[in-house]
Image (cartoon, helix red, strand yellow):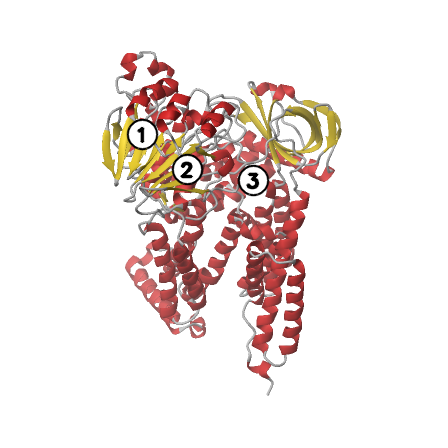
C-alpha cells in the first residue's frame, strides 16, 4: 500500500516553511554554533527526508522543516558575522575630540523650527563619510553619520541635497543605549539603518565642496520627493500640510510630540506612518479605479503592483513599506492564478522572502506587527466573516430572482424570503408614494448590505485589537481600550483621504485650480481624523499603560491565538471558544493587576541609567515603592526625548510596575525634574514629595499636572522621620525655612534645595543626596549621616562629596548617576580619588548602566544592568 495516498498535503505549506525558518532564525540568534555544524545538520536532515519520502511521509515532512529550520539558523549567523565586519566602529574617533569630516549626503532632511527651548531651526540629514582629519592626520573612513544642523534664522538655512559633498568640524559620538532592562535598542535601530555615529554642527560651519557623490537615480528620487513635499505645502495650510506629509509620504519632520502621543493613545498611530494599511488602501483604490474604466483584470493588477512599487521607492522609507508592497504584490499575483483562498500561503511566501533577504527583520516590532496583523485577518477574521456575514451578503444579490434561492444554504434562502415579505408589506403600506413597486426590495438589500459591511469592519477591528494585545503591551506598554471605536471612525476617513490626496497631488502638477477640489476632500477627511484622535486621545481611559507581560501571559496569548486559528473553521463552539480565549488572554494582559518583580524582605536602591541626571528607585522590605527624581535633559539639548516616558517608564514596566506608591523630586533642575510629568501620568502615585516651597515658575507645570491627576503634594524637610514600608526614613535636608535664610535661593534654584533622605533597614542604610553641595553637606555632618550606600551628590561634581562629609558617612558603596562623555567633566577625578581613599566600591551608570543595591539589614549585595530580576 502506498502510504502517501492516505496523507493529505498540509494546508499553506509556505506558511509552515516560513514558521520553521523563523524558529531557525531565533535559534541561530540566541544559540550560536559553528557554521559547519549547521551545514552538517542540514545535509543529514535533507538526505533523511529524501530517504523517508516514500516510506514515512510525515517523517519526511518533519525532516524537510528541520532543513528549513537549520538554514534559518545558518542564515542569521552568517548575516550577523557579515554585519559585524561591515559595521565595525573601531575607526570612529569618538573620544570627544573635534575632527574635520568630509562626507556626502545620503538622506535629505527638511529644515523646521525646533520645539525645544532654544527655538532654533533644525535640519537632520544622514551622510556617509569619505575621510576624517584628526590632529593633522587624514584617513579614509566610510561610515554612516546622522548629522543635526542648527541655525538661529530659518531664512538663512537651505536644505542640503542628496549627493552634495560637505566638510564640517564635529565631535563624533557612538550611539549609546540607556543600559536598563527594557530599554529601547537605539544603537541597534540606527545600525539597521546604516548609521554608526552621531554628530551636530552649526549651519555656518559647513563648507560645500565641489563634485557630486552618489547615484543619479537616487538623486532624482530625492528631487521628486522634495517636489511632492513642496506641493503638499502649496495645497494645504499648516498644520494640515505637516499631517498630510506624514499620512501620504511618511515624512514626520513637522509633527510634534503631542500630536504623536494623541495618535498613540487612540490606537491610530498607524495613520501617521506609511504602513501596510495605507499601502493597501491606495492599492485597492487604484485597482478599483482601473477596473471602473474597463482596464482588464491582468493589466489592472500589473499596473496596481507597478504603481505600488513606484510609491514605495518614492517614499524612501525602507523595509517597512517594501514589506507592505510585497504583500500587495503577492495578493494580486495570487488572484490572477485563482488562489484567492490561499491567503495564508501568500503570507508565508512573503514572510519567507523577507526573512531570507533580511533576516534581522524578524526581530523588529515593525515586521512582527505587520505580519501578525495580516495573519490574524487571514486566519481568523476572514474565516469568521465567511461563517457569519459573507453568506448573507452573497444572498443579497438578485433578490428578485427566486431561482437563486435553491443555490444557497437554507438559512440564507429563508433570509431572502423574509426580505421579500417585508418588501411586499412596505409596498402595501406606502402605496404609490414609492416611484415604482420594486423600490422597497432593492432599498432593503442596500440597507442590509451596508449593515453587514459595518458589522465586518467592527468584527475585524475587534479581532485585531484583541489579537495584537500582546505585541502592543510588550513593545509599547499600551492597552488602547478605545482603539476599536477610534479606528471605526478613522479608517473610513483614511480610505477617503488617501486616494483624494494622491489625486490632488497628481492634478497639482497640471492644474492647481482643479487640484483644490480633491485637496478639499482630503482636508475634510484629515480634519475628521484629527478631531476623532484628539477627542479620544484626551480621554484618560483611552490609554492604559501596562507593564511588560510575563512569560505565562505571552505563552497563554500565543496558545490561544494558535487555537483560535486552528478552530475557526471547525465546529461552531470551537470557533467561539477560540476567539473567546484570545479575548480573555487580551483581558489578562491589559487589566490583570501586575506583580512587580522585587526582593521581599530587602531594601532595594537602584540608580536608573538616565544619562546626565538622576532617577533612583527605592523598594522597601514590604514591597512599597518610591521613585526619587525622573531624569531629564537641559533646555539647550536639541531632542524630543522624554526621559520619563522613554527611559524611566520602560525600566519600571520591565520590572512589572504598573503603579508607584510615592514619587519625590529633590529639586527643580531639568536633569531631575523633566521626566516627572510622564511618570506621574503613567504610574499614578499616591503622593508627590517636595523639599521646599513649590511655588516657583519652573515647578508650576508639574504641580498643574499633579493637580489634574489628583495627586497630593507633600513637603518634607530637615528633621522629619517616619516609617515607610518597613524602612526608617529620615530627612536630612533641606530646612523648610531655607528661603528665609537666603532670599535669593528661590530665584537661583541652587542645589542646596535638594531633598536629602537617609533610608535605613536593620543595620544597613542608604543616603540619597540629590545635588546637595558643600554647604548642605557641612550642615548634615552633625546629623549622623552614616550610610552603607551613598548616592554621590551632583553627579560627581567637585562641588560635593567633601572629605569631611565622606568621613562622616563612611560609605562601603557609592554610585554616581552620570552621562557618558558629558560636557561638565563629571565625575571629577578629585571626587573619584576621595571615594577611593574612603575604600568605597564605586559604581557609575555611564559605565555599568542601572545599578541595584539590596540591603537585607545586615549585608549589602549589588547587581548591575543585564542581569535578570
Could you say whether the residue bearing mark 1 is in a helix, strand or loop? strand
Residue ID for mark 3: 187
Task: Check if mark 1's residue and mark 3's residue have beta carbons within 8 Å.
Answer: no
Q: Please state if 353 lies on the left or on the right of 816 as rendered.
A: right
Q: Residue at x 53, y 35 (%)?
A: 252
Nearer to us in this view, 342 or 84 = 84
Q: Position of residue 253 (x, y in %)?
A: 53, 32
Could you say whether the residue bearing mark 2 is in a helix, strand or loop? helix
From what the image shows, is residue 664 above or below residue 582?
above
Q: Classify mark 1: residues with Cα within 10 Å, few (<14), some (14-19) or many (20+).
A: many
Nearer to us in this view, 456 or 79 = 79
Residue ID for mark 2: 648
Q: Is residue 795 visible?
A: yes
Residue 757 got which mark? 1
Nearer to us in this view, 193 or 605 = 605
Q: Position of residue 168 (x, y in %)?
A: 66, 24
Distance CA(mark 1)–CA(mark 3) = 36 Å
User: Which one is closest to the eye, mark 2 or mark 1?
Assistant: 1
Q: Classify mark 3: residues with Cα within 10 Å, few (<14), some (14-19) or many (20+).
A: some
Q: Earlier in the sequence, mark 2 or mark 1?
A: 2
Distance CA(mark 2)–CA(mark 1) = 21 Å
Quarter of the view holding residue 727? top left
Question: How many numbered circles are shown?
Answer: 3
From what the image shows, is residue 383 above or below residue 632?
below
Q: Classify mark 2: residues with Cα within 10 Å, few (<14), some (14-19) or many (20+).
A: many
Q: Is residue 265 visible?
A: no
Q: Residue furthest bottom?
A: 1
Amino acid at each position: 500500500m502506498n502510504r502517501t495516498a492516505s496523507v493529505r498535503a498540509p494546508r499553506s505549506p509556505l506558511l509552515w516553511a516560513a514558521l520553521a525558518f523563523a524558529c531557525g532564525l531565533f535559534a541561530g540568534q540566541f544559540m550560536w554554533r559553528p557554521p559547519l555544524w549547521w551545514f552538517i545538520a542540514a545535509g543529514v536532515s535533507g538526505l533523511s527526508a529524501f530517504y523517508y519520502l516514500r516510506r514515512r511521509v510525515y517523517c519526511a515532512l518533519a525532516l524537510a522543516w528541520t532543513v528549513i529550520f537549520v538554514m534559518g539558523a545558518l542564515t542569521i549567523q552568517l548575516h550577523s558575522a557579515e554585519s559585524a565586519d561591515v559595521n565595525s566602529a573601531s575607526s570612529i574617533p569618538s573620544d570627544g575630540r573635534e575632527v574635520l569630516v568630509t562626507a556626502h549626503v545620503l538622506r535629505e532632511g527638511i529644515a523646521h523650527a525646533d520645539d525645544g527651548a532654544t527655538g532654533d531651526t533644525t535640519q537632520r540629514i544622514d551622510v556617509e563619510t569619505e575621510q576624517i582629519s584628526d590632529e593633522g592626520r587624514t584617513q579614509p573612513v566610510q561610515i554612516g553619520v546622522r548629522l543635526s544642523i542648527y541655525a538661529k534664522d530659518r531664512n538663512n538655512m537651505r536644505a542640503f541635497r542628496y549627493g552634495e559633498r560637505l566638510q564640517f568640524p564635529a565631535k563624533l559620538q557612538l550611539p549609546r543605549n540607556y543600559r536598563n532592562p527594557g530599554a529601547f535598542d537605539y544603537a541597534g535601530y540606527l545600525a539597521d539603518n546604516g548609521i554608526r555615529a552621531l554628530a551636530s554642527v552649526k549651519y555656518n560651519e559647513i563648507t560645500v565642496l565641489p563634485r557630486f557623490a552618489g547615484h543619479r537615480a537616487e538623486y532624482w528620487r530625492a528631487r521628486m520627493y522634495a517636489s511632492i513635499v513642496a506641493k503638499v505645502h502649496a495645497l494645504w495650510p499648516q498644520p494640515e500640510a505637516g499631517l498630510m506629509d506624514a499620512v501620504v509620504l511618511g515624512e514626520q519632520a513637522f509633527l510634534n510630540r503631542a500630536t504623536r502621543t494623541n495618535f498613540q493613545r487612540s490606537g491610530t498611530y498607524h495613520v501617521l506612518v506609511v504602513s501596510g494599511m495605507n499601502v493597501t488602501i491606495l492599492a485597492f483604490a487604484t485597482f478599483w479605479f482601473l477596473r471602473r474604466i474597463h482596464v482588464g483584470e491582468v493589466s489592472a493588477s500589473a499596473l496596481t503592483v507597478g504603481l505600488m512599487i513606484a510609491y514605495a521607492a518614492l517614499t524612501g522609507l525602507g523595509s517597512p513599506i517594501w514589506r507592505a508592497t510585497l504583500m500587495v504584490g503577492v495578493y494580486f499575483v495570487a488572484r490572477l492564478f485563482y488562489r484567492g483562498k490561499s491567503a495564508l500561503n501568500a503570507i508565508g511566501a512573503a514572510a519567507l522572502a523577507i526573512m531570507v533577504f533580511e533576516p534581522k527583520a524578524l526581530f523588529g516590532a515593525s515586521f512582527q506587527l505587520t505580519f501578525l496583523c495580516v495573519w490574524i485577518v487571514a486566519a481568523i477574521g476572514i474565516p469568521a466573516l465567511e461563517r457569519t456575514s459573507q453568506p448573507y451578503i452573497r444572498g443579497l444579490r438578485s433578490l428578485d430572482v427566486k431561482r437563486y434561492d435553491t443555490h444557497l444554504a437554507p438559512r440564507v434562502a429563508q433570509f431572502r424570503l423574509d426580505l421579500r415579505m417585508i418588501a411586499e408589506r412596505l409596498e402595501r403600506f406606502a402605496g404609490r408614494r414609492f416611484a415604482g413597486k420594486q423600490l422597497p426590495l432593492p432599498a432593503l438589500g442596500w440597507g442590509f448590505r451596508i449593515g453587514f459591511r459595518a458589522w465586518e469592519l467592527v468584527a475585524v477591528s475587534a479581532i485585531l485589537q484583541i489579537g495584537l494585545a500582546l505585541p502592543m503591551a510588550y513593545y509599547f506598554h499600551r492597552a488602547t481600550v478605545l482603539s476599536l471605536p477610534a479606528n471605526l471612525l478613522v479608517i473610513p476617513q483614511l480610505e477617503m483621504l488617501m486616494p483624494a490626496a494622491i489625486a490632488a497631488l497628481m492634478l497639482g502638477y497640471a492644474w492647481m485650480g482643479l487640484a483644490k477640489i480633491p485637496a478639499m476632500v482630503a482636508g475634510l477627511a484629515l480634519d475628521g481624523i484629527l478631531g476623532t484622535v484628539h477627542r479620544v486621545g484626551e480621554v484618560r481611559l483611552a490609554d492604559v499603560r501596562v507593564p511588560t507581560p510575563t512569560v505565562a501571559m505571552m505563552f497563554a496569548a500565543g496558545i490561544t491565538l494558535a487555537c483560535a486559528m486552528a478552530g475557526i473553521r471547525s465546529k461552531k463552539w470551537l470557533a467561539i471558544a477560540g476567539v473567546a480565549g484570545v479575548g480573555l488572554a487580551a483581558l489578562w494582559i491589559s487589566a490583570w493587576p501586575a506583580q512587580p518583580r522585587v526582593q521581599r524582605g530587602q531594601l532595594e536602591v537602584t540608580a536608573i541609567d538616565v544619562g546626565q541626571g538622576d532617577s533612583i528607585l527605592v523598594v522597601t522590605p514590604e514591597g512599597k515603592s518610591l521613585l526619587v527624581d525622573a531624569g531629564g535633559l537641559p533646555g539647550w539639548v536639541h531632542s524630543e526625548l522624554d526621559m520619563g516616558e522613554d527611559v524611566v517608564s520602560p525600566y519600571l514596566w520591565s520590572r512589572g510596575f504598573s503603579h508607584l506608591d510615592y514619587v519625590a523630586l529633590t529639586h527643580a533642575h531639568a536633569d531631575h525634574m523633566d521626566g516627572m510629568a510622564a511618570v506621574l501620568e503613567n504610574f499614578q502615585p499616591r503622593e508627590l514629595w517636595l523639599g521646599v516651597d513649590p511655588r516657583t515658575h519652573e515647578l508650576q507645570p508639574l504641580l498643574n499636572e499633579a493637580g489634574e491627576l489628583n495627586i497630593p503634594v507633600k513637603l518634607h524637610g530637615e528633621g522629619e522621620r517616619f516609617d515607610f514600608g518597613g524602612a526608617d526614613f529620615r530627612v536630612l535636608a533641606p530646612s523648610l525655612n531655607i528661603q528665609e535664610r537666603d532670599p535669593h535661593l528661590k530665584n537661583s534654584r541652587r542645589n542646596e534645595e535638594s531633598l536629602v533622605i537617609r533610608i535605613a533597614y536593620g543595620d544597613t542604610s542608604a543616603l540619597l543626596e540629590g545635588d546637595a553641595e558643600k554647604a548642605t553637606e557641612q550642615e548634615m555632618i552633625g546629623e549622623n549621616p552614616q550610610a552603607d550606600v551613598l548616592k554621590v551628590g551632583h553627579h560627581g561634581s567637585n562641588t560635593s562629596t567633601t572629605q569631611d562629609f565622606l568621613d562622616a558617612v563612611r560609605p562601603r558603596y557609592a554610585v554616581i548617576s552620570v552621562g557618558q562623555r558629558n560636557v561638565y567633566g563629571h565625575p571629577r577625578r578629585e571626587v573619584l580619588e576621595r571615594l577611593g581613599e574612603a575604600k568605597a566600591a564605586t559604581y557609575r551608570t555611564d559605565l555599568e548602566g542601572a545599578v541595584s543595591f539590596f540591603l537585607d539589614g545586615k549585608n549589602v549585595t549589588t547587581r548591575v544592568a543585564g542581569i535578570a530580576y
